[in-house]
Image: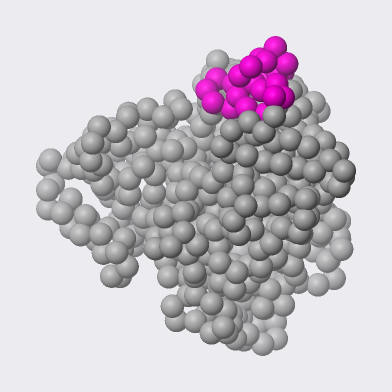
Amino acid sequence: MERRHVLTSLAGGLASAGGLLAANGRRPKRIVLLYADDVGYGDFSCYGAQRVRTPNIDRLAAGGVRFTDAHCSAATCTPSRFSLLTGTYSFRVPAAKVLPGDASLLIEPGSVTLPSILKRQGYRTSVVGKWHLGLGRGPIDWNKEIRPGPLDIGFDESFIIPATGDRVPCVYVEDRRVRGLDPADPIQVSYRGPLDDSPTGKTHPELLRMTPSHGHDMTIVNGISRIGYMTGGKSALWNDDEMADTLTNRAVSFIEANRARDFFLYFASHDIHVPRVPNRRFRDATVMGPRGNAIAEFDWSVGRILETIDRHGLRNDTLVIVSSDNGAVIDDGYNDEAVPLLGSHRPNGPFRGGKYSNFEGGTRVPFIVNWPARIRRGSVSSALVGQLDLVRSLADLTGAKLPADAVPDSENVLPALLGETKSGRKRLVEQASSLSLREGDWKYIRPLKGNPSAVNAGNETGSSTEAQLYDLTSDPGEAKNLAADDAGRVARMESALEAIRSGRV
């Protein structure tokens, strides 16, 4: 496939069911997707965390459905975000890997996406927060209009971090332009080498307030060295300490401006991703240092957004979803005391691995759905669901008719999302260094060629030159490989995985 994968065009048309009724009953007037970054299955108190409290997220769980077998599509961020918005497994698109900060837009303009579907159904659509899906075509001139971008794949407005907090450029992009840029101080970005002789984290570590543990030793912004090189744009640089406030205030403003109409808000927080720099208000929020405090800060953002919805009397008819882009990672490139202060906290709960891993901790993440008008309070569901299923499920919920070949890997699991059944998917592919297949409670990890490393950034990758098979009912921690004892099941699951990978099913 070409680098710029073309998804099914909107030219086929998205037909509205008309009015306020969707195929399965009344549709929500508002849909809010709260997407955390690098939050593991065990990082919220409603999933068992005791060394950090998340009362606002817990309140959503208590009032809705809390899923115990929900997954992002991949164990890293760009692939998961691609699948979330397109309903397509990212392994079908070779370019859908963790992107540098100057990458081209990964999703082809005009594609059928979650925001484009909801926009056609009459929702005002907005993305606020981390993007990390590329911008523009070819080399980006950060000093001019940047297109294509979120506005070209279905969002009416956007206020984004182009990539991640540990990658340059360290600026916000509002719609199509860098916010607050002084034309007399133009931005230059390079991922190939230094642009000038400015100090870097590698050459001048004495200038840093947070030192890197590995990598992250290039351009210094706010006393933190990043990945990549950047010059100029001083008036546009973000303040890491105020990032959560800036993004949350923007989300609140969107809700207030659109409270009288239907809207979709995709709020993609950055808090728990490195560099972890929560506002000083959260300095003593937990005993786990910056990582734990960042989790508390994300819960605060959720609370601010919920309070705004409540204050305007919108709560009953607002569908709220909380999840994460991949499992947790502790040391991900900076010396921020995350490892020594972890204590008894189990960020990925009972599951093995985490971010980057083929084991369940890589993709099994918190997933909460709350909608007072439709969902019974306090439900816990073991249904197997994937974030890429939101596209087809929300299309059904809002009455959208999709072209036959659109969102090819998304399944309609709406009854499970609404807590009406605990049956979800039959099969789900998980992606890390290798591909894995979930089939009920069985997990098959495809072997890799060569000699894969057993550890990546402190997380077991689950990579092996041998096939792996686990029965998650009796072995949720994937400790006992049953492949040698059940060669027939291995062969059947490998065949099923290959059929999905090759697009035969």
Q: Please indicate whether residue 267 sits to the left or right of residue 393 in the image.
A: right
- Is 198 included in the stretch rendered in magenta? yes
State the residue in front, 473 or 2: 2
Asked where in the image residue 32 lies, by quadrant, the reply is bottom right
State the residue in front, 65 or 44: 44
* Residue depicted at 25% across the width and 59% down the height: 498
Residue 161: image location, x then y, percent: 70, 46
- Is 200 included in the stretch rendered in magenta? yes
The colour mode here is one colour
Residue 315: image location, x then y, percent: 76, 61
Q: Please indicate whether residue 438 sits to the left or right of residue 188 in the image.
A: left
* Residue depicted at 20% across the width and 59% down the height: 495
State the residue in front, 126 or 205: 205
* Residue depicted at 59% across the width and 73% down the height: 110
State the residue in front, 194 or 9: 194
Does the rendering let one see residue 320?
no
Residue 119: image location, x then y, percent: 68, 73
Does the rendering let one see residue 362?
yes
Quarter of the picture holding the C terminus: bottom left
Residue 130: image location, x then y, percent: 66, 47
The span shown in magenta is 197-219
Quarter of the picture holding the N terminus: bottom left
Q: Check the image and name the residue furthest to the front.
A: 196
Q: Main secondary structure of the magenta part?
A: loop
Q: On screen, 498 above or below 232? A: below
* Residue depicted at 12% across the width and 48% down the height: 487
Q: Check the image and name the residue furthest to the top.
A: 206
Numbered circles on residues, count? 0
